[in-house]
Amino acid sequence: MAATATASTHSPAVLTMPRPQRSRRQPPRSSMALPYARAASPARRRDNSSGTSLPDDALAGIFARLPHAADVVRCAATCARWRRVVATSAAPLSPPPPFGRFLPHLAVGVFHLPKAGPTTTRTQPRFLATATAASSGLLGRRGRRSIGSFFDGAAAAAFDGSRPVSSRGGRLVLELRREIRAGSVTLCVCNPMTGDAAMLPPLSGDDTPADYYGCALLTGDDLHPTTSRRRGAEFFRLLLVYTSRRGGGFTALRCYSSDTGRWGPEARSAVSVTTKELRDIGGAAVRRGVAFWPLDNGALGVRLDGDDPDLGIMDAHLLPYDCSHEWLKTRLLGVSPDGRLFLVYLGIRGGIHTLMAKMSYFDIPDDEDGGFHNGRKESSSDEEAIPTHQMKMDYRDLATLKLRWIGDKSGLVLFTMGGRGGHDGAHVLSLQEGTVEKLADEGHSWGSAVGFEMDWAAYLSSMAHDPRN
């Protein structure tokens, strides 16, 4: 379905190193730790101090052609200079290769509001690190910190009263305080690990979503996987699904593009989404440039026309489920490492009463449009069960279970529970390992909450900076 309506309204720093010295004298002390703990032999010291005569950009070009990510990390462990080249050139070394498995260490924590409901004007989303991220010191000091602490100066205050909306690919989407901007919605797309932030133009008047909305963040790798490097690592598009204030309140779609710096026109969706579904719709899974949200009776898929500069042409379709899943709060959509769209939902395994995750895969042909235009697709009968033996529970515990977020690269599922069953709090389930980590004793009372994954550039940089790797 194609539809249009009325339109709405830096390069990284390069470090300069001294010319290679052939002297055996100890080089100046560096703030970056050497990659070896024991004292190096004279021959090794000569190798570390002189290294190759190739300039940094040539080295980065060689590293970019290595067949495996592990090879890049091994190069970073060779010497301080090579580690610096990998760390400062991480973005050109991305996008990542196919992993073939989830990487749980890509997920570093959760951004959340301390409680549901209205917040004060000074309340900011809080960040809670996973145990692995906290022990590595990857995000600075341990403990909880506000979103503003990741940014410098006056920018930190801009997040007062904000709430996390979505997170994907190393970026976090925040809605800035509505009460300050009455009658409008202002979104911010930021990267807390780099301090970069893009404030989007507000949607106001008739362009404002009537109430709840779903949000999908797409990168150049999603839309143009073979040409995304030419767009730059900063490129993104933000797709919204919501109820329009025009024409009796139809389901609308609208997209923002970072390269134009503006919102496209409002488009009418061929698939209607109820207010109840929008209230719990959350973030989207993205497969081959198509954003998918879980609804009551199927998955809403929306594909952008990547060549449309006005961002007004979109296709919407419903992929029905082959079984009934009545509770939006207990299921999410994700994409497997081999590129399959799946529905994950939590329940209790009978008899032993342990929490179990099930992954039900969709049958989508891999043609040029990713099977998107080939009619309605039933989900396949292929299901994968993942028991979590450490979580014994009762059926009554499921009443408070809420799935919050899933990491498409880490395979971590964030969920919260309440009640008195002994499992109240915030947890992350690893689909790769079948294990559960408890993040906090609270969580059921949280307001908006989303997990956060590093992008590939940040992951390479963190691996290169840590000599233990």
Image (cartoon, rainbow, N blue to C red):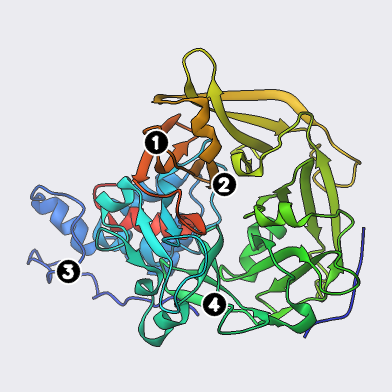
Which residue is the site of mark 1?
420
Closer to the chain start, of discs 1 and 3, is 3
Left/right of residue 412 with respect to residue 226 in the rendered view = left
Q: Are marks 2 and 1 in contact (CB under 8 Å)?
A: no
Residue 405: image x %, image y %? 54, 49
Q: Amino acid at mark 2?
A: Asp
Closer to the chain start, of discs 4 and 1, is 4
Left/right of residue 362 with respect to residue 117 in the rendered view = right
**Considering only vertical position in the picture, is 86 above or below 392?**
below
Task: Look at the numbered disc 1 and give the secondary structure of its residue.
Answer: loop
- Frontmost of labels 2 and 4 is 4
Cα gap from disc 2 to disc 4, whole angstroms: 28 Å
Q: Amino acid at mark 3?
A: Ser
Q: Which of the 4 image quadrants contains residue 246?
A: bottom right
Residue sitting nearer the eye, 45 or 37: 37
Which residue is the site of mark 3?
30
Task: Look at the numbered disc 2 and give the secondary structure of its residue.
Answer: loop
Which residue is the site of mark 4?
177
Q: Amino acid at mark 1?
A: Arg
Cα gap from disc 2 to disc 1, whole angstroms: 31 Å
Residue 396: image x %, image y %? 51, 30
Residue sitting nearer the eye, 43 or 368: 368
Q: Few, some or many C-alpha atoms within 10 Å of disc 4 (few <14, some 14-19, many ≥20)?
A: many
Q: Amino acid at mark 4?
A: Arg
Closer to the chain start, of discs 2 and 4, is 4
